[in-house]
Image (cartoon, rainbow, N blue to C red):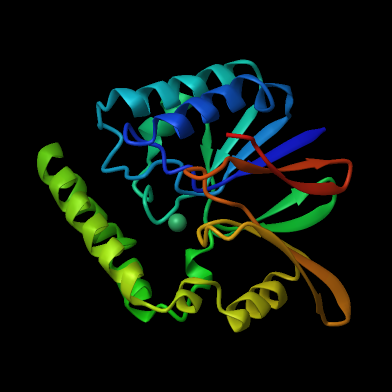
Amino acid sequence: MTRLFVSDLHLDAAAPQAVEQFLDFLRTQAADAEALYILGDLFEVWVGDDDPDPTKARVCEGLRTLTANGVGCFVLHGNRDFLIGRDFCRKTGSRLLADPVVADLDGERVLLTHGDALCTDDHSYQELRSTVRTPEWQRRFLALPLADRELIANQARAGSKEHTSRVIPNIMDVNQDAVSTAYRATRVRRIIHGHTHRPGVHDTAIEGEPAQRMVLGAWYEQGSYIRYESGRYELRELPR
Ligand code: MN
């Protein structure tokens, strides 16, 4: 049974190549899989399930077709699309999972997470994260008219670009202590995440046992995914 993992597609009308590549991925590789796990930031921004954006609607239709054909689709929130809600799930036939979540894959417990919570060196981001993830903040935000929500989201994106251009690159990566804590607290020996846009496979040892952290890449440069089959995980790139 094949399972596929993707993250950080950052899809919107400004990234037509990534949109087409993902829709093609859904029709080909994903169509033959048992399940697709989307580990956050499927969309560049998501201001609510009532967003009528036609590009996002096409992505939702692609997911709908996938799940209608019997492929399970599981979605984690990213830092860009943490407002994905119940209507999105209904429309696409996908299921929202908590972040982080321990999945049982053929008997192996694997920690799935977007990855932003592991970047604990970025204090100002973590502060913002804890604010916008409260139910009160989200309820107030979602009660605003769509145009206001879009305006606020665009300002937040501009602020985030400014922030990421200022902080030293290492701060934007995972904190090694946070990673060790995650391994120990959940007793897993495999972590799969995205967010840092640094695709790679990191082998380590936790309590004397081999452990592996697999990082998915972002799709605006090149599509990447992890393919799991019969106990084997492989990080793959899609040609652009
Ligand atoms: Mn992210």
**Rendered image quadrant of residue 204:** bottom right
Question: Which image quadrant is residue 47 in?
Answer: top left
x and y, in percent, of residue 211 in the image: 80, 69
Q: Is residue 236 left or right of residue 51?
A: right
Q: Residue furthest front?
A: 240
Does any portion of residue 72 appear in the rendered image? yes
What residue is shown at x 62% (from left), y 43% (from top)? 224
Quadrant of the frame with the N terminus: top right
Image coords of residue 183 (percent x, y): 70, 73
Could you say which quadrant of the image residue 65 lies in?
Answer: top right
Query: Quadrant for ligand 1?
Result: bottom left
For image coordinates 50% across by 58% down, the residue present is 195
- In depth, the one of 44 and 103 nearer the eye is 44
Quick one: quadrant of the C terminus?
A: top right
* Image position of 220 (left or right of 137): right
Residue 143 appears in the picture as rendered? no
**In the depicted structure, whether residue 60 falls above or below residue 102:** above
In the rendered view, tell whether residue 140 sits above or below residue 30. below
Q: In the rendering, at what x and y percent does residue 163 appear?
A: 29, 70
- How many discs appear? 0
> Which residue is rendered at x = 29% and y = 58% of the image?
135
Q: Nearer the viewer, residue 154 or 183?
A: 154
Lateral position of residue 24 relative to residue 17, left or right: right
Task: Report the front residue among 217 and 188.
Answer: 217
Whether residue 180 sits left or right of residue 231 in the image: it is left
